[in-house]
Every structure is written in C-alpha cells, then in structure tokens.
Image (cartoon, rainbow, N blue to C red):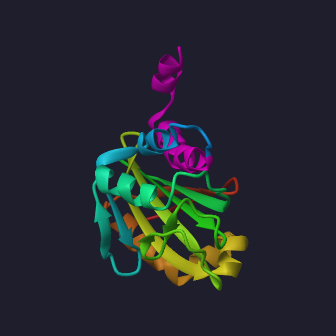
Amino acid sequence: MAADRARSRSPVQRSKDAASGFTSAYSSSASDRMDQVMRFFHEDVRVSRLATGTMVLSGKAKLKLAFEKQGTAASAVQTTWDLVMTSSDSQLYLHAYESGKSPGLGIRGLQAQALQKTALLALFRVKQGKIDHIWLSETPKDLAIEGSKEKIMASEVWQQVLEVAGDSGSAWDCVLADEKFCVA
C-alpha cells in the first residue's frame, strides 16, 4: 500500500521526498537509522564543494562510512529555509542550516563540528527520486536565517547555484516560501 502511494506521486514530489526525507531520517533515533538515511541516495552519489567543485567523496558506501564515523546517535537537523528548483530532467534543493543544525554536512564534506560564524547551504540534486549529488557551501549566518529571494539572489552562493543549474542546459522553475519564479 505504501509502495503504491510512493509510485503514484509525481517525480517532483518523489524528489522532494528524497531531499527532506534524508534530513528527517538523519534526525531519527531508530536502530536502523543509517539504513533509512542511505535509501535516499544513488549508488554513485557525489559530495562536492560548491565554490570550487572539488569532490569530497564519491559513492554510497563511502558516504555511509563518513556518516558512521560521526557516530550513530541521532542529531537534530533544522532547515531554516529551502529553495526548490525544477527542470525537465532533475530537481535541485537548496537547504539552509544554521551552525550545528546540518545533517552531518560541512564545508569540508562530512563533519560533526559546528561552524561558529557561518552556516551551511547544501544543494541537493535529485534524479529519478534519489539524491545523486550534494554541493556544500559556507554562508553568512544572516543568509541562512533569513532566506529572502532578494538576499539569496544577491549572494555569491546564488551565482554558484546557477553555474550548477546551467550545466543542465534547462530552464528552472523555482519556489521559495510559496513564491514562484523562473531562471534560465
């Protein structure tokens, strides 16, 4: 029954489920927490730095090991805002996290330490209902706390997001706090 509901959802809804489901599973205290977390990722998932494109790690097995090195205890994850970008073949989700509230992600990839003066933006690319790439970027706390369209689009990070989006050659429909807009 649950499988039928999952199949009946649109590709965009399944993709949104992957990005938000990952963060929910990471916060879980269930005994099979890591298995729940990992079901949202492609086998060949990559984690990179957004500013440079430098790959931090590649592969689902390496990602799981990196998460496990941080410990298996549940960690409170809190997204302060998210931006959804949809094209014809994939979706991008830009999530903002205040210091210490990200799902084990940091500018150096995966780390448990909290950033003190900055916050984290994580850009998730979802294809076929699974996360296949995560780009990470530090950002000033004020952008992570107040993610208005104007602040986001004026930020250096936005230019980096557009570079990632531009690689697909598609136009993108965007939604931020129920405000819809397009970027080419």
Tag count in the figure? 0
User: Is 129 above or below relative to 70?
Assistant: above
**Residue farthest along the top direction in this orientation:** 1
- In the image, residue 156 sits, relative to residue 92, either above or below, namely below
Relative to residue 102, is residue 43 drawn left or right?
left
Task: Classify residue 133 as left or right of residue 93.
Answer: left
The structure residue drawn at horizontal position 45% and vertical position 24%, both measured from the top left corner, is 7
Examine the rendered structure and indicate whether residue 4 appears above or below residue 137.
above
Residue 101 in the image, given as x and y percentages of width and height: 64, 64
Q: Is residue 91 magenta?
A: no
Q: Image point 38% across, 46% down: which residue?
A: 41
Magenta span: helix, strand or loop, mainly?
helix
Q: Quadrant of residue 48?
A: bottom left
Q: Is residue 68 left or right of residue 46?
A: right
Quadrant where the C terminus lies?
bottom left
What is the magenta range? 1-27
State the image coordinates of residue 177 (x, y, percent, origin top left).
70, 57
Closer to the camera, 177 or 117? 117
Seen at 55% across and 59% down, the residue is: 103
For the point 64% across and 69% down, the residue is 100
Residue 146 visible? The answer is no
Residue 14 pos. (x, y %): 49, 37
Residue 51 in view, yes or no? yes
